[in-house]
Image: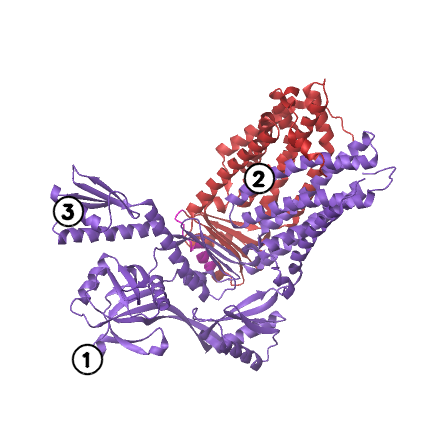
Chain colours: A purple, B red
Amino acid sequence: MNRFSPLTHAFIVLVLSIGILYSLPNLYPAKPAIQVAYTDSSKSADQRLLSDVEQILTSNSILVESVGLKENNIVAKFSSFDDQLAAKAALQKNLLDQAIVALNLEPSTPQWLRDIGGGPLKLGLDLSGGVHFLLEVDIENALDNRLESLLNEYRKKFRDDRIGVESSTKDDTVLTFAFVSDEDYNKAIRAFNEDNITAVGTSLYDLQLNSIRNIVSLKYSQSAIKEIRDYAVGQNLMTLRNRVNELGVSEPIVQRQGSSRIVVQLPGVQDTTAAKKIIGKTANLEFRLEAAPTASRLRKEEFSYQDERMGSAYLEKKIIVAGERVTNANSGFDESGFAQVNITLDMQGGRAMQKATNGNIGRRLGVLFVEQKNKSTLVIDDAGNEVIEQTSYIEKRIISLATVQAVLGTNFRITGVGSPQEASELALLLRAGALAAPMKFVEERTVGPSLGKENIQLGVRSIIMGLLSVIAFMFFYYRWFGLAANIALFANVVLITGFMSLLGATLTLPGIAGIVLTIGMAVDANVLIFSRIREELKEGKDPQTAIQEGFSRAFVTIVDANVTTLIASIVLYAIGTGPVKGFAITLSIGILTSMFTAILGTRAIVNLMYGNKNIKELRV
Amino acid sequence: MNFNIPFMSYRRVATISSLVLLVLSIGSLSFKGLNLGLDFSGGTLIEVSYEQAADLADIRDLVFTNGFDDFQVVNFGSNSDVLIKVADKNGNSQIGDVVFKFLQAADPAIELKRIEFVGPQIGTELRDQGGLGMLVALGMILLYVAFRFQYKFALGAVAALAHDVVIIFGLFSLFSWDFDLTVLAALLAVIGYSLNDTIVVSDRIRENFRGERGYEPEEIVNKSINQTLSRTLITSLTTLLVLLALFFFGGDMIRGFSQALIIGVLIGTYSSIYVVANMLLGLSITQDDLAIPEPEGAEFDDMP
């Protein structure tokens, strides 16, 4: 009696070994490392950069454990933090603006563990230190701008087509046109229909007609608003990713959250002001005509191409239109199947473009990409030390120079842009230059590196203290049964660590609190079982039956009690953000693993101690 | 341990003290309100660490002369750590950097521990989400308990939970403790914990109602509470042990969390004895309420 079948034993061993296996990576300390990547995010690290890095390290006689290519970076691992810092200084001094050098911690997980998907626990920002930003994309503004330009577009169209408009207004999100006569009204509807705006309902606009008072009102449909929002957020997301790359942070997170928010997490970054400046900076575009060869030096400027092999060209000093007038840009194909880029400007931009290109057909139109950049130089400071000084400057490069074929308006295209891939890159650059909608910081949390370390120490200390006090209590109160419960408790902590590492869950300070709480609550199942066994013994049952009954009768209670806590923690996960989510995750995983260890684990140990034996007296 | 305490004879005393605590809590909540932490109030918080004990009055003067008027300066953890909270309705995200700059100018040796900025709309959202989450959790638990037990138990369980939550809210309001997101997390954990207790007691009440005929409901409830008492006390004790470890060793950032849970465990233990039992007797539970044996019970009998 009270023996588990081999199958049950096998299952327990299997779950435990998975837990142990995946918690192993946490035992290997992270190694100080350095990440080197080209400043130009379109270039991935290559053999040349690798040999440069190797050469710089050897010439400065810095001990390095390994250097190699990893994804788009060069990663060098060191055996001490001093070597790491020395290497960073040496690399920065030699590479300057050519590459971004970032300090990093590389997990030293052995290859065989990595092959099965093992890795150490991810630490939340409250433990690793770093910055968390939450940015909100101002969709209202983007919608407002688009409606405004739509209003101007139709005002102009009706004027050109001699359609009598009594009034045209924009009221919040609705455009309303009132027409002079029935005839004007019908003509206007035809004009709308030509643009694919119909009363039957199109995907983009909702059109409302009032034929008695000759009023047409127009607003964005729900799906159009969603589309514009997705477009604006997506574009901002892409721009932010590019900018964050410039910061040279290892493992940054740039993610959409909810409908119109973007989370940026930069572990290890301490200078928030600098980070904010880069995140908040805007790239821009300028459209200018190519300068005539005879133009005076005062009226033209020389710019180099983005692609350095193409040299440079002279453009006029006068800017026709800047990036904030670009409302959309995407790549496509022309009639003969060549790649092209379609550009949409707003009303005002279209008018300026029309004026500038009128009479200039055959000349070339240049598009300049304007970016704020940082430059590092080595200078000697007052104390005579070499320090790296950063200055910011504005760089303008030509991304396209194409012949004007016709008078351009709000919609035009650039052809002869090369391969479809190059076309889509150009469209991307055009869009990146024009932020789809402004963003603002709505939440920011910075944790200094010392606080992160302190939090880890405090957390580990409270886990140890909590665990020890519970283990001591259980052993003194229940003796051998307590020992079984303690082994199960220990297995539980290993399982939580293992499963959290396996699932790639993030450990936060409240998450550690969750583990501590689980330790206290996990023994509850055992206490329930043991109390039950005592009662059964008191009722005069023999020890083996008492063990059997105790476990089975407590089971239902344990499940009921745990399911309800699980409900609470799932709700917590749904409503919580960041650290609190971390608490909910550890609590949920802890509840599941503790049910496993307290019920099956303890039973297995108790069975091994007492099963199939003739016990006269049982002390619980 | 053998207990035979006539818990139910003290029903009146317990009901009165619960009511007094509830009235006090609700009174404090409505007149004094909660001292909302940054997560819910919005604003900026800067924690800096000085090399020696910091002079709070000096720092206050410094912040004031730099043009801020709605702010708090307090020690955090030790007397060399200072926490500055600046309220700002406009959602200016630069305040943290500005404050740190002029503090650093006054004393270059300071170290920045953290800056937290929560915009006004985020604060409101978190507040709404938190309140809603609390209600959803209570509702779902009500459904689960009603499904697994019987509606009278469900009402008892939810009354016990509401009782615990309101009193914790009340204490946080009465003593002006900071109520932030981690405290809300603790409250939800309290809901889970207190329920755990409630279910163990209810389970036994149900079992005894089914098994033993010819007793008064009050006797059965009393017997059930006594039978589960040693377990209730031991579990509360182990949970309190780890929470005390968190409270004393876990640092200041989760002190509010452990504080809320410690109170929650104490009140939760009390409420699972008195509030639930009181509700059940108040709703005059009878053996007929639990007469039909549930298939779930039979199914689980053969499991370990």
Kind of element beneath mark 2: helix
Does A602 appear in magenta?
no
- Counting residues from the start of the chain, the first of labels 2 and 3 encountered is 3
Closest to the observer, A338 or B18: A338
Dot 1 alpha-carbon crowd within 10 angstroms: few under 14, some 14 to 19, many 20 or more = few
Three-letter amino acid code of the residue under disc 3: Lys
Q: Is residue A346 above or below residue A62?
A: above
Image position, residue A308 (x, y; %): 36, 77
Closest to the observer, A395 or A158: A158
**Chain letter of the residue beneath label 3 in the structure image:** A
Magenta span: B89-102
Label annotation for residue A294: 1
**Chain letter of the residue beneath label 1 in the structure image:** A
Which residue is disc 2 drawn over?
A: A567
Q: Is residue A207 above or below residue B93?
A: above
User: Mark 2 to mark 1: distance in Å?
Assistant: 78 Å
Residue A255 visible in the shown view: yes
- Counting residues from the start of the chain, the first of labels 1 and 3 encountered is 3
Which residue is disc 3 drawn over?
A: A187
Same chain assignment for discs 2 and 3: yes
Kind of element beneath mark 3: helix
